[in-house]
Image: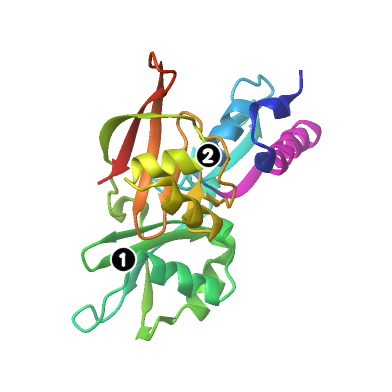
Amino acid sequence: MSIYQHYRPEEHEFVDRVLNWKSEVTERYSPKLTEFLDPREQEIIKTIVGNDTDVRLSLWGGSSFSERKRAILYPDYLEAKTQDFQLVCYDIDYPSKFSSIEHRDVLGALMNIGVKRGKYGDILISGDNVQFICAAEIAGFIELNLTKIGRTGVKLLPIEENQLIEAKTEYDERNGTVSSLRLDVIVAEIYNLSRAKASPFIQQGRVKLNHKVTEQVAAEVMEGDELSVRGLGRSKLIAIEGTTKKEKWRIRYGILK
């Protein structure tokens, strides 16, 4: 039985990376620290490494409520400590009386200075307070180059992990029935759209499935999958609860509050 049958085709490349990390730890008998992983990647690495007796796994992104986390794969003789994840946390100091900073502004600023998404974790915003977490190996580069976000001058202030804003993910749960588990059908149901409107959103790259843009309207959505539609917010297919007498799928989903 192939391990790949449990994953979508577009996930096979990441599965290969996890298998290589696992082999590297086994052969070298030394730990492997990854870049930041999104929640779906964390689930994949858990299923592949989680029950292994020779290679252990720990995940950490700066706090117990972190969404994006780094993973350490390590031999059974070691214990992973918080400092081993090599994280640096920042508070962004900016003139909040005269300007505002949103999540997408921080993403764009980091992208503009050439920082790959795997090198930084959560971006946390509460009112005027803006923070982010990055990998220690790139912290110096970010401090030197991230001096503006949009047109606003900023200064990065290192903080401790216990100073991070607590982010809570709460979903407004709802129930529905759908004719299939195709992405366009699920998006139409969750966001109260017609399929005729949902399909172009997907084809134009405005929809993410498990944090990855997909333009395949017929992609199958599975239980636990996370969705986001640009401009309409994030959601999650919480459960598939069987079929109706008319052979439609009963689903339970959540829309991020």
Position of residue 249 relative to residue 16, above or below, is: above
Q: Secondary structure at mark 1?
A: strand
Q: Nearer the viewer, residue 162 or 20?
A: 20
Q: Nearer the viewer, residue 197 or 216?
A: 197
The image shows residue 19 at horizontal and vertical percentages of 73, 34
Write the residue at 45% across / 39% down: 185
Position of residue 229 relative to residue 221, above or below, is: below
Going by the numbered disc 1, the residue's amino acid type is Val
The image shows residue 202 at horizontal and vertical percentages of 51, 53
Q: Quadrant of residue 236?
A: top left
Secondary structure mostly seen in the magenta stretch: helix
Q: Please give the count of numbered marks on the rendered protein.
A: 2
Write the residue at 57% across / 30% down: 46
Q: Earlier in the sequence, mark 1 or mark 2?
A: 2
The quarter of the rendered structure image containing the N terminus is top right
Checking the image for residue 40, the label placed there is 2
Taking the magenta stretch, the answer to whether it contains residue 18 is yes
- Please name which of the two marks, 1 or 2, marks the residue nearer to the observer: 2
201 relative position to 9: left or right: left
Image: magenta residue range: 12-36
Q: Residues within 10 Å of mark 2 (few under 14, many from 20)?
A: some
160 relative position to 59: left or right: left
Checking the image for residue 130, the label placed there is 1
Q: Quadrant of residue 226?
A: top left
